[in-house]
Image: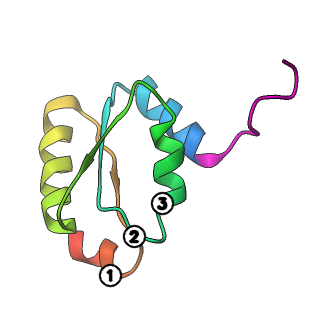
Amino acid sequence: GAGSEAPPNLGGHLARRLVELGCDTFFCVPGDYNLVLLDQLLKEPKLRMVNCTNELNAGYAADGYAREKGVACLVVTFTVGGHALL
């Protein structure tokens, strides 16, 4: 009924935009600081999550996906996680 929907959030918005752009998969290295975002992305039924063992592997996977599809999404933690995939 009315009022039963969750309030809008950034993760939900990103998920919808990724689908609109033709992205159906996102790559990730789960960590303490990105679990809330991952939960929000997983609520979008048209997206699937691919867990990667480390940031370097995730970066290569997302790069290959983007070369094929034109867009990709990669979720890692900040600082060490982000620097490791550069």
Magenta segment main secondary structure: loop
Rendered image: mark on residue 35? 3
Q: Would you say the residues marked 1 and 2 are in contact, meaning their CB atoms lie under 8 Å apart? A: yes
Q: Earlier in the sequence, mark 2 or mark 3?
A: 3
Quick one: SS at disc 1? helix
Q: Give the vertical position of 12 relative to 59 (above or below).
A: above
Q: Specify whether residue 86 is in view.
A: no
Rendered image: mark on residue 14? none
- Magenta-drawn segment: 1-10
**Circle 2 is placed at which residue position?**
77
Q: Is residue 63 left or right of residue 37?
A: left
Task: Tell which of 29 and 16 is nearer to you.
Answer: 29
Q: Specify whether residue 28 is in view.
A: yes
Q: Percent position (x, y) of residue 24? A: 32, 29
Q: Which quadrant of the rendered structure holds the N terminus?
A: top right
Rendered image: mark on residue 80? 1
The residue at 76%/30% (across/down) is: 5
